[in-house]
Image: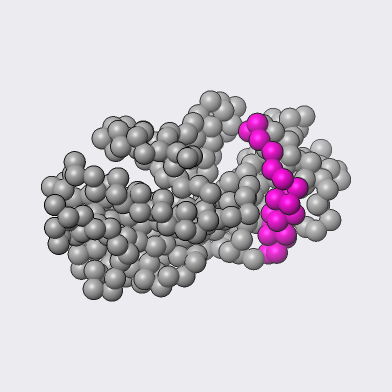
Amino acid sequence: MSILVRPIQLTDRAQWAMVWADYLRFYETSVAPEIYDHLFAKLTSRDASEFQAFVAVVGDEIVGLAHYLFHRSAWQVQDICYLQDLFTAPNHRGKGIAAALINAVDQAAKAGGTSGVYWMTHETNTPAQSLYNKVAQRSGFIEYVKAQA
Amino acid sequence: MSLDIRPLRPDDRAQWGALWQDYLAYYETELPQSVYDSSFARMLSAADHEFQGQIAVLDGQPVGLVHYLFHRHGWKVENVCYLQDLFTLPAARGKGVARALIEAVYAEADRAGAPAVYWLTQDFNKTARQLYDRIGHVTPFIKYAR
């Protein structure tokens, strides 16, 4: 079985949406249909100031995705790369797909002149962290948000 | 005591630079002047995709700063607000400066229609977290980088 990681393309819309819905479900959330349209348009715009994406393909099936954004950091002149969404379909785990997606984002981040890639993960997500601890550093930073009124 | 939070101005360069240097020293970080110049110019540019900065002036003296950025979020149509840097001079702590700076960013985020404001802090930074736990709330998310 060979895994292909490639930039997302317009014909991926239906399969990408199913994979992203599964990802969002993992976070016990869902978004409105117009958010799918909005994000997919950004992902396929090939505009380096918008979200970009890689998909992992096995055969003719999309089995994973990575969404990433280059944005400013006040600490440097070059941008930094935020990997927001990373997902592998449950029946395709353990095959190195997530690592391949992270590598693809890392290469794109370097090619785009950014200083590196960062991402956030849930503190209880130990399967993900067992990979992340191999390919990245746990920074010691935690996230706070404005309390909703 | 009079506390004023206002956007950075061109004539703040020297005092802003001194504050930011102190902040970075807390993180055991030194940055070249080119980054000070670049970040300051970007914050004054008022461009949508650039950082913005506010300064806290206590009884006429600059004592604190905040740097924040509106950026895309894949799950929303609106941009969200990332508060990257927050600092109060040690001598001016305990006077509500940091809270006022965060509240100024909250107000800017509301004005810009940003549905979320977030920031990162070291998990062991107990002093900062005492304030953050009052004015925001901790998420279960932790940062990885490579």
**Nearest the camera: A105 or A39?**
A39
Q: Is residue B67 visible?
A: yes
Q: Is residue B20 visible?
A: no
Can you tell which quarter of the image residue B65 is in?
bottom left
Q: Residue furthest right?
A: A60
Q: Position of residue A102 (x, y in %)?
A: 61, 45
Q: Which residues are magenta?
A: A27-46
Q: Position of residue B113 (x, y in %)?
A: 53, 56
Can you tell which quarter of the image residue B125 is in?
top left
What residue sits 73% from the left and 36% below the top? A22
Residue B103 lies within the magenta run = no
**Nearest the camera: B80 or B124?**
B80
> From the viewer's perspective, is B38 left or right of A25?
left
By what rule are the colours in the image chosen?
one colour
> From the viewer's perspective, is A137 left or right of A17?
left
> From the viewer's perspective, is A140 left or right of A86?
left
Residue A28 lies within the magenta run = yes
What residue sits 27% from the left and 50% below the top? B87
Q: With respect to residue A17, does B34 lie above or below?
A: below
